[in-house]
Image (cartoon, coloured by chain):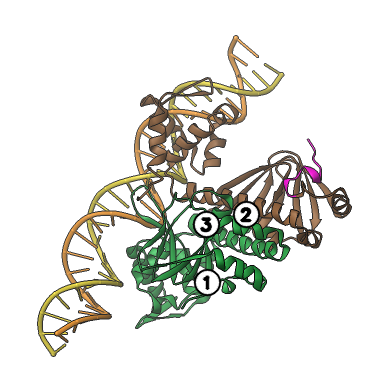
Chain colours: A green, B brown, C yellow, D orange
Amino acid sequence: MEFELKDVTLFSRLSKEQLETLQFHVHVRHYSKDSVLFYEGDKSAYLQILLGGTVRLYKTTAKGSQIHMHHFTAPEIVALYAAFEKVSFPATCEFLTDGMIGFLPLEKVYELLGDSDFSMTLISVLTKRMKLLSDLFHRETIYTSEAKIADVICNNPTVFSRLKNTEIASILNITPETLSRTLTKFKNKKMISIDHHVLTILQKDALIEIIEANIISKH
Amino acid sequence: MEFELKDVTLFSRLSKEQLETLQFHVHVRHYSKDSVLFYEGDKSAYLQILLGGTVRLYKTTAKGSQIHMHHFTAPEIVALYAAFEKVSFPATCEFLTDGMIGFLPLEKVYELLGDSDFSMTLISVLTKRMKLLSDLFHRETIYTSEAKIADVICNNPTVFSRLKNTEIASILNITPETLSRTLTKFKNKKMISIDHHVLTILQKDALIEIIEANIISKH
DNA sequence: AGACATTCTTGATGCATATCAATTAAATCC
DNA sequence: GGATTTAATTGATATGCATCAAGAATGTCT
């Protein structure tokens, strides 16, 4: 599936003329699965627009292990704030599928900032990104492994049929062993059951309690 | 020290008239040291502007311990993205000194969004906040305790004369014991010396190496 | 269906840092 | 300037998860 500039939320409210100008300055490159778009620490003078495929953003620890941050599926802007702040990318971006990137020179984006429709869209996209990062921070610093797992079970139970446990573990930044042990524990406590990769929630309350224990209100 | 709206970066480029309109709708409240401006999970229909004093933002873990996030000193906007995204505050905000908050109804801020000067300032302020959060995420997920400590020693050595070790530890989200042990280790290795609360760096290279070990480039 | 590869599970051990507890050092107060 | 409070150090132990290692279960291929 390949997208165009107008399909990207950030550009959705631009006029035909504005889109055409942008289109003229965009150059498109194709990437194959597993290739790296950029590494943590790189810089770029282009806004990088994911027009096809899915990418994964992650940091690398001192020991070489990876901290998963986000998945982005086209159409989407990658590394939005890093582009605007002109700082180096805080994470590595790798293709999970074959994909396609549109490179738009940052100057061309700056030229749009006078357009208040564009600015408002940009503000909205930025704050949504901020929420994404803020939620990630919460998961990684406040949640225990159990809470992370309870959280996906409640909010995204279908991943258990779509992905292998090793993949789920890597997204949650825990080891497959910990995931396996915790799922066994939940099964023993009759909070969930898993049959042929289909997860059924038996005691939502108990799961929510595990998550909530990690969102203490001090009122 | 008390500030006015025009001293806040976000409003610095507004016209006299715009400022006067805002001023008319702002209501100001004074807070005493240690009081809480808002709790994690709260919502507000106002943009909260710190016009005097210093606040601290932190999350609370399941066990009741606190994860320090930021210090903000007036003049500054607190909880900027949460206001714009209309989501609940991701952290608790507490005064470290006596202070003063200006409450501005969000509608009044929205009215400014048509002004492209304002929008551009807002975009710039938002991306800077994003960098703050991104750096915090990096410190908390990638850095080891040693790296955190090496980092403050290199980038902010004066804190050791300004703050008690318990306070430094709490900002770094480590225990005073760990801080003490690590500083002793650095002293034994002749990387630093501390005399009457004044820290002297003896081997910057060695410290930087500890930090860099946590910023791997895979090129 | 049988064979090989991959993934999952389970147990043993390791590691970084927190927690608990006691002692020592430093700061503050009358 | 000694007494008292507060902070820093040091050692022993606990904890939550990762790592290592093997075996069991499941998936894939011809």
Badge 1 crowding class, 10 Å Cα cut-off, few under 14, some 14 to 19, many 20 or more, is many
Residue identifier under label 1: A75
Local SS, label 3: strand
What's drawn in magenta, residue-wise? B1-10
Task: Tell me the element at label 1.
Answer: loop
Say yes or no: labels 1 and 3 on the same chain. Answer: yes
The quadrant where residue A128 appears:
bottom right
Around disc 3, counting alpha carbons within 10 Å, would you say few (fewer than 14), some (14 to 19), or many (20 or more)? Answer: some
Residue B42 seen in render: no
Task: Tell me what residue is drawn at x 68 percent, y 54 percent.
Answer: B79
Q: Residues within 10 Å of mark 2 (few under 14, many from 20)?
A: many
Q: Are marks 1 and 2 on the same chain?
A: no
Per the image, the residue denoted by label 2 is B91
- Please tell me whether residue A168 is drawn above or below residue B80 in the rendered image: below
The answer to whether the residues at label 1 and label 3 have Cβ atoms under 8 Å apart is: no
Q: Are marks 3 and 2 on the same chain?
A: no
Q: CA distance from mark 3 to mark 2?
A: 34 Å
Which chain hosts label 1?
A: A
Badge 2 amino acid? Ala
Residue B144's label in the rendered image is none
Question: Which dot marks residue A46?
Answer: 3
Between A46 and A26, the one nearer to me in the picture: A26
Q: Is residue B171 above or below residue A39?
A: above
Question: Which kind of residue does numbered mark 3 sit on?
Answer: Tyr
Q: Chain of mark 3?
A: A
**Front of the two marks 1 and 3:** 3
Q: Is residue B176 visible?
A: yes
Decide if residue A170 is on the left or right side of residue A112: left
Q: Secondary structure at mark 2?
A: loop
Q: Nearer the viewer, mark 1 or mark 2?
A: 1
Q: Is residue B193 above or below residue B169?
A: above
